[in-house]
Amino acid sequence: MIIKKVDLLMTAGNKSQYPETDYPEVAFAGRSNVGKSSLINVLINRKRFARTSAKPGKTQTINFYSINDSQMLVDLPGYGYAKVSKKEREKWGKMIEEYLNDRDQLKDVILLVDIRHVPSQNDVLMYNWIRECGFEGYVVATKADKISKGKRQKHIADIRKALGIDDVRKIIPFSASDKLNRDAVWTKIKELSEK
Ligand code: GDP
């Protein structure tokens, strides 16, 4: 994918703020700190374009990145901070639900999990939610550089089992540090966008 132009079109807190574009959208979900901003930055060839980790208490938004005026990458707010209030959690849920259910341009949602850890209960809930919405359920296993090559297959197998994934090819190991599988993730985004 050759990146000619990237724009952060909108940081939306609710539906009325979604951009009025008709580009296909592929969204990324995952717990805070999983590496979502880092993945987006590698995909768009920018060092620090996507915001770095939203800290607890910071406003959570859905961020729309327009690529070459033809494709949208969407950064969904992360989950999993122990310290957020019930009210903030509810707001997060409503924001995601509204986007997953009501956005016609949304083609698919890719879940990010850390390759080092067995998916958490929240990851499983998020994955089931994605599947219940009728999406394919592709997973990017981030921070692959943090474990040796020889161990990756075992970790991928554990992730597959925990999430109840049928086809292991649905899990793409990725590293922002060495750009492992950047092209494979783009290929998948394009494929999902053409559905
Ligand atoms: P986000 O909260 O999901 O957007 O996560 P970030 O992209 O901000 O990443 C959280 C932390 O993990 C940062 O310190 C990143 O530098 C680090 N990180 C993200 N991706 C990778 C990766 O592929 N390899 C390594 N070693 N660190 C990563």
Image (cartoon, rainbow, N blue to C red):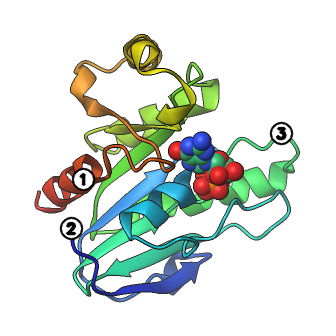
Q: Residue at x 86, y 62 (%)?
A: 57
Q: Amino acid at mark 1?
A: Asp
Q: Report helix, strand or loop for mark 1.
A: helix
Left or right, residue 103 beside residue 40: left
* x then y, percent, for residue 47: 53, 70
> Where does label 1 land, which residue?
183
Q: Residues within 10 Å of mark 1 (few under 14, many from 20)?
A: few
* x then y, percent, for residue 68: 26, 84
Q: Amino acid at mark 2?
A: Met
Residue 1 got which mark?
2
Say whether marks 2 and 3 touch (CB < 8 Å).
Answer: no
> Where does label 3 land, which residue?
82
Q: Vertically, is 189 above or below 24? A: above
Q: CA distance from mark 2 to mark 1?
A: 7 Å
Q: Vertically, is 182 above or below 114? A: below
* x then y, percent, for residue 78: 63, 52
Q: Vertically, is 3 above or below 98? A: below
Q: Report helix, strand or loop for mark 2.
A: loop
Q: Quadrant of the C terminus?
A: bottom left
Q: CA distance from mark 1 to mark 3?
A: 34 Å
Q: 194 or 128, which is in the foreground?
A: 194
